[in-house]
Image: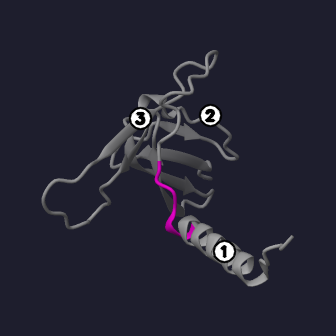
C-alpha cells in the first residue's frame, strides 16, 4: 500500500494545518488576515514511503502603516528629556499622493557638513593665495 505524497502548511505554533496539498504546491498566501509582527511558516512534506521532512521559514508581516522613529534607537541609554519624532505612513489611498507626512524628516549628515566646511576653507585659502589687488 503506497502512501500519497502530501504537503501540509502550518502557521506559527498551530497544531492543525491551514492547508494541505499534493505536491507540487502553488498557492497565494494572504497575509492581510495576519496581525503585524513575526510569524513562522512550517511546511511538513510526506513522501510516498511515509518519510516526513520539515522546513521552517520565519517571516514578518507588516500590513499596517510603516512607522519610523527618530531620536530613540533600540537599546539606547537615555537621560533627561529627548526629542522624538514619530511618523507613520502607509498605502491606504493609491489615487492621491500626499507630500506632507510621506517622508520622515532627517538631519543633514555630519559628513556633508565636513565636506562643505572643507570646500569653503579650501576656497578661502585659494582666494587669499592668488589674489592680487590691481593698482591703477
Distance from the alpha carbon under mark 3 to that under mark 1: 44 Å
Seen from this angle, which residue lies furthest bottom?
129
Asked which secondary structure carries label 2, the reply is loop
- Pick the front one: 135 or 69: 135
> How many numbered badges does the structure rendering display?
3
Q: Earlier in the sequence, mark 2 or mark 1?
A: 2
Residue at x-position 79% and y-position 81%: 130
Q: Which residue has dot 3 on it?
A: 88
Residue at 59%, 51% (x, y): give it: 3
Determine which residue is flagged by label 2. 28
How far, Cα to Cα, is label 2 from label 1?
A: 63 Å
Tell me which numbered mark, 3 or 1, is placed earlier along the sequence.
3
Q: Residue furthest right?
A: 136
State the quadrant of the C terminus: bottom right
Whether residue 107 appears in magenta in the rendering, the answer is: yes
Q: Name the spot of residue 4 as percent of width and height, x first.
A: 61, 48
The stretch drawn in magenta includes residue 88: no
The image position of residue 100, as x and y in percent, is: 51, 27
Q: Say which label, 2 or 3, has the lower sequence index.
A: 2
Give residue 43's mark. none
Q: What residue would you read off at disc 1?
A: 124
Q: Quadrant of residue 124?
A: bottom right
- When the figure is inspected, residue 129 is found, relative to residue 32, above or below; the finding is below
Q: Secondary structure at mark 3?
A: strand
Span shown in magenta:
106-111
Specify whether 54 is left or right of 133.
Answer: left
Relative to 77, is 36 on the left or the right? right
Observer-side mark, 3 or 1, equals 1
Query: Contact, CB < 8 Å: mark 2 with mark 1?
Result: no
Residue for point 66% across, 43% down: 25
The structure residue drawn at horizontal position 62% and vertical position 34%, both measured from the top left corner, is 28
Amino acid at each position: 500500500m503506497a502512501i500519497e505524497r502530501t504537503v501540509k502548511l502550518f502557521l506559527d505554533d498551530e497544531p492543525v494545518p491551514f492547508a494541505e496539498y499534493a505536491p507540487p504546491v502553488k498557492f497565494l498566501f494572504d497575509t492581510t488576515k495576519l496581525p503585524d509582527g513575526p510569524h513562522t511558516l512550517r511546511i511538513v512534506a510526506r513522501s510516498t514511503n511515509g518519510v516526513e521532512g520539515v522546513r521552517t521559514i520565519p517571516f514578518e508581516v507588516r500590513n499596517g502603516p510603516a512607522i519610523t522613529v527618530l531620536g530613540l534607537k533600540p537599546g539606547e541609554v537615555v537621560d533627561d528629556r529627548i526629542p522624538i519624532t514619530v511618523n507613520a505612513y502607509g498605502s491606504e489611498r493609491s489615487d492621491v499622493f500626499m507630500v506632507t507626512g510621506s517622508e520622515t524628516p532627517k538631519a543633514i549628515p555630519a559628513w556633508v557638513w565636513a565636506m562643505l566646511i572643507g570646500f569653503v576653507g579650501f576656497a578661502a585659502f585659494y582666494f587669499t593665495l592668488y589674489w592680487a589687488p590691481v593698482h591703477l
